[in-house]
Image (cartoon, grey):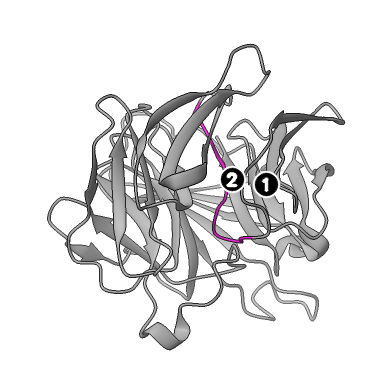
Amino acid sequence: MKTHIVTGVALGAVLVFSSEASAAPTPDLSGAVYAGFGNQLTRYADGEWSTLAKVGATPQFAASPDGTKAAWVTENGELQVMEGGKASTLVNGLQGGTPCLTPVWSADSSRIAYPAQGDTIMVAKADGSAAPEKVGTSPGVCHLAWSADGRYLAGYNTQGDSLYRLNAKTGKSLPAKGVKYINHVQSLSPDGSKAVVSIPESPETLGDGTWPASFKPVVLDIKTGKKERPAVKGKQIGAFYLPDGRLVVRTAGTRGQSGTAGPAHNSLVVLDSAGQPVQRIAEPAKARNRALLQVLA
């Protein structure tokens, strides 16, 4: 086991890199996007905070994978996009005020998928240069996640008892195996075969579909229904797939872990495609109680 400690990392003061005779360095994470009080979406990169969007009362929001844009559905059903400090309306007539009906960005941050009427999943170019296109109909419209290869969109149904994966190439939607209760879909593996989800213990703990500030991540194999917890020590409060197949697991900090009496830092632990930890990065203390929307690679 090789271990390297590197200072001056973008997300925090210390990064721990571990590998089993790793052949090549793992690319560092460049930042993250969070949702905080009042649904304010903020980006942390290069040691600085910046505001992506202040979406107000609406809980239906998403941040682009490159961390430069935000999308949200207003209370009156407008899909809006914020880029460069300018907001524009992309689509009208959607269902606003429903927390779980969130849009999702493509891996290249150029397109947005969103649920429309009748469980229809639509895709629009973020710059509004073309009319939205229907990619299929699926009961799984809640907290949509999009695989990095662009083929699959997955979400859970409004009853919270099934996850469905829509093939955007064929328009066919199929239920995942092994799901009895579900209340969040955080992300899909690059090929869409696995999903990071939150599985409540009972229907009484389903919640209202609001994006969670934290959750116990489960990696679900959509075809077989096999469930696994990421192999990371500590209290896990989230996980996120990167486009290259790495899995980033968020763990809760404990006060005093840095030898001071100040606020504790959560950590982002990066696992390679084989499930081995290769990096541990301290988040800024300010992000402690914020929801993690994107990890920027």
* x 44%, y 72%: residue: 216
Q: Is residue 196 left or right of residue 29?
A: left
Helix, strand or loop status at disc 1: strand
Helix, strand or loop status at disc 2: strand
* x 74%, y 48%: residue: 74
278 or 246, which lies in front? Answer: 246
How packed mark 2 is, by other alpha carbons closer than 10 Å (few <14, some 14-19, many 20 or more), is many
107 or 77, which lies in front? Answer: 77
Report how far apart the C-alphas of labels 2 and 1 lie in the structure.
5 Å
* Residue 75 appearing in the image: yes
User: What residue is shown with label 1?
Assistant: 33
In terms of image quadrants, where is residue 190?
top left
Task: Check the image and report above or below for 97 versus 106.
Answer: below
The question of residue 104 being in magenta is answered with yes
The disc label shown at residue 49, or none = none
**Disc 2 and disc 1 in contact, CB within 8 angstroms:** yes
Q: Earlier in the sequence, mark 2 or mark 1?
A: 1
The question of residue 129 being in magenta is answered with no
* x 38%, y 29%: residue: 135
Q: Which residues fall within the magenta stretch?
A: 98-107
Task: Check the image and report above or below for 113 versus 95.
Answer: above
